[in-house]
């Protein structure tokens, strides 16, 4: 029977204070050891805040514009200038963060569920793993962009369709990574002991395999958010993204940036920098989480 220490018994608040101090110490160590990942986390936080608070922090509406102010340069009223119909570029970039966050987190979350199901099931049920891996080989042999464009041309362009198509593309590669980690866990002694004691397959998967694969799943899903944002921007650039008037960074590059790049290059530079910041932030944050959560990576840097 577990006994509490005298200090915890006499002073119940002491345990909570110690836990808070330990949490602050871990965060301080992460910031000190992973400055690049911390910068990436701040970028990600800024993008999420822009997506959530766009109506409050954007100077204008994303569809508000005046032709008399078309193609103006940066000024006090329009810090990043205006586009070809007089809409504020800064406001459209802020609103464009909504599309990037929705597609990024939505697609990576759906891909995470599908990849975890395929990877863990394939590692545990060996009789279905061979056929599943051959299916994944065919899946991965098709170029991702071609697969997404084909699916969107059949089912139409829209936020839900883009999230589903991008999730299906991302799940194939992620399932291989999760499967490799789950295979190592499935052959450990404690999993064999759980089977010997009569534990059901569901209990072994949920209590012994998934918790040990969770750090890998978290790292993979974090890195894939940046990939999903980049795919969404590519689709918007090619005209298969979220339809207007909803602004997206890829759409701003396609419609505005290419048409006026020779005379107004900033119209392409600003949304391009937003895409770079989002992808960079998610990638370095995922790299830092890998170093933090994966025991094999600790101490290498």
Image (tube, rainbow, N blue to C red):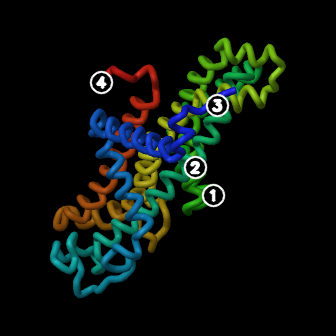
Distance (Cα) linking label 4 and label 2: 37 Å
In percent of width and height, residue 286 lies at 41, 38
- Determine crowd level at label 3: few under 14, some 14-19, many 20+ residues with C-alpha closer than 10 A: some
Viewer-side label of 3, 1: 3
Viewer-side label of 1, 2: 2
In percent of width and height, residue 88 lies at 29, 76
Distance (Cα) linking label 2 and label 3: 26 Å
In percent of width and height, residue 16 lies at 49, 45
Q: What residue is pinned by disc 1?
A: 155
Q: Are marks 3 and 1 in contact (CB under 8 Å)?
A: no
Q: Which mark is residue 165?
A: 2
In percent of width and height, residue 250 lies at 38, 58
Query: Can you say whether 8 is above or below 92 in the image?
Result: above
Q: In this view, does 161 lie to the left or right of 203?
A: left
Distance (Cα) linking label 1 and label 4: 46 Å
Q: Do the residues labelled 1 and 2 touch (CB within 8 Å)?
A: yes
Distance (Cα) linking label 4 and label 3: 27 Å
Distance (Cα) linking label 3 and label 1: 34 Å
Residue plotted at (41% across, 52% down): 234
Residue plotted at (34% across, 66% down): 93
Viewer-side label of 1, 4: 4
Q: Which mark is residue 301?
A: 4
Query: Can you say whether 163 is above or below 69 in the image?
Result: above
Query: Can you say whether 212 is above or below 218 in the image?
Result: above
Q: What residue is pinned by disc 3?
A: 210
Viewer-side label of 2, 3: 3
Q: In this view, does 78 lie to the left or right of 19?
A: left
183 or 200, which lies in front?
200
Chain-order first, disc 4 or disc 3: 3
Chain-order first, disc 1 or disc 2: 1
| Helix, strand or loop under label 4 | loop
């Amino acid at each position: 029977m577990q006994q509490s220490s005298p200090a915890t018994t006499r002073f119940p608040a002491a345990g909570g204070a110690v836990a808070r101090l330990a949490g602050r110490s871990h965060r301080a160590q992460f910031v000190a050891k992973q400055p690049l990942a911390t910068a990436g986390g701040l970028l990600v936080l800024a993008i999420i805040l822009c997506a959530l608070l766009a109506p409050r922090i954007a100077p204008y509406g994303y569809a508000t514009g005046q032709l008399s102010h078309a193609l103006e340069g940066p000024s006090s009223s329009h810090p990043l200038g205006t586009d070809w119909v007089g809409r504020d570029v800064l406001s459209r970039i802020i609103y464009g963060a909504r599309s990037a966050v929705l597609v990024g987190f939505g697609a990576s979350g759906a891909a995470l569920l599908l990849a975890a199901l395929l990877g863990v099931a394939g590692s545990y049920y060996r009789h279905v793993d061979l056929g599943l891996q051959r299916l994944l080989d065919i899946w991965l042999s098709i170029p991702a962009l071609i697969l997404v464009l084909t699916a969107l041309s059949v089912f139409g362009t829209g936020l839900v369709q883009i999230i589903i198509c991008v999730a299906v593309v991302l799940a194939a590669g992620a399932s291989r990574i999760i499967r490799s980690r789950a295979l190592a866990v499935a052959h450990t002694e404690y999993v064999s002991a759980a089977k010997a004691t009569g534990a059901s397959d569901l209990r072994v998967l949920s209590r012994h395999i998934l918790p040990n694969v969770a750090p890998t799943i978290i790292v993979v899903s974090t890195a894939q958010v940046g990939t999903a944002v980049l795919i969404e921007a590519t689709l918007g650039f090619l005209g298969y993204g979220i339809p207007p008037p909803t602004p997206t960074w890829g759409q701003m590059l396609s419609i505005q940036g290419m048409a006026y790049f020779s005379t107004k290059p900033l119209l392409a530079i600003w949304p391009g920098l937003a895409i770079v910041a989002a992808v960079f932030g998610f990638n370095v944050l995922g790299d830092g989480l890998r170093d933090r959560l994966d025991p094999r990576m600790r101490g290498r840097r």
